[in-house]
Amino acid sequence: MSYQNMIDLSQDKAALTALYAPLQHHFRVLDVPTLPFAILDGKGLPKPLNVGAAIKILSTAIEPIRREARQRMGRAFMEAPIEILYWANNPQDLAAGNRDRWQWRVQMTLPVWADAACFEQAVAQMRPVLGAEPVLRWEAVTEGKCVQVMHVGSNADLSALLHQLYTQYLPKESLEPLGVYHEIYLDDWSKAASARRRMIVRQPVR
């Protein structure tokens, strides 16, 4: 897919705000356009140790792209947030927050000019650091119609919000989940106090 067919979030401030600055406690329906992602599938339970290792691998793999982005954008460069997608064989485990039954993957939005060939070149450049095992991929993802909301606080406080989303808001709006639920982390959780951590909760719907 040509990047000319994708929205350049570095230029479209309205789209950037709509996608990454939702209101807290306010569910919103929006259309998420096709965006390019660097993706690494998770291994093991979604525990902090496993997730942290995957984030480090993904961040290392795209370092050449980051350097190029910083050169192109200068002071306007903004680090893309980490996104983690979760799914479960039983959807009720999502609503209940039973993370030990979730499957997951880590992904990060790339600049529109960083196509599959650019990504493969970056991974090859970083392979001596990454080692042979991690299998990373580039993918143009179209989520389409989604519901999202801002969550501020720790993961321990998230279950009530998910329960509200799946058992109250979606049925009320005659919507049902279609696609993979995910969380977009706007803060470095290793540094931010738990009460102030900002996370976007997003669920594709129909």
Image (cartoon, rainbow, N blue to C red):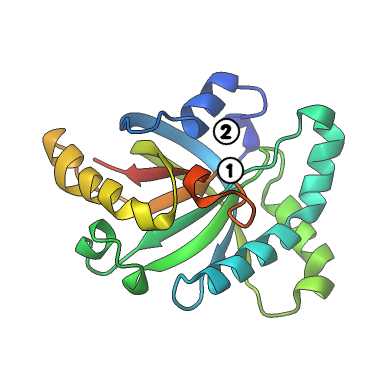
Q: Is the C terminus in the top left, top right, bottom left or bottom right quadrant?
A: top left
Q: In terms of sequence position, does the residue under pointer 1 or pointer 2 come before the other?
A: 1
Q: Residue at x 33, y 29 (%)?
A: 28
Q: Which residue is mark 2?
A: 6
Residue 121 found in image quarter? bottom right
Residue 1 found in image quarter? top right
What residue type is disc 1 on? Met
Foreground mark, 1 or 2? 2
Residue 99, image x and y in percent?
35, 68
Q: Residue at x 76, y 28 (%)?
A: 76
Residue sitting nearer the eye, 16 or 4: 16
Residue sitting nearer the eye, 76 or 194: 194
Look at the image and tell me whether residue 180 can be seen.
no
Pointer 1 with pointer 2, Cβ within 8 A: yes
Residue 11, image x and y in percent?
66, 23
Residue 61, image x and y in percent?
73, 61
Alpha carbons under labels 1 and 2: distance apart: 9 Å
Give the vertical position of 123 relative to 172 (above or below).
Answer: below
Circle 2 SS class: loop
Q: Which residue is mark 1?
A: 1
Q: Residue at x 65, y 44 (%)?
A: 110
Q: Label for residue 188?
A: none
Circle 1 SS class: loop
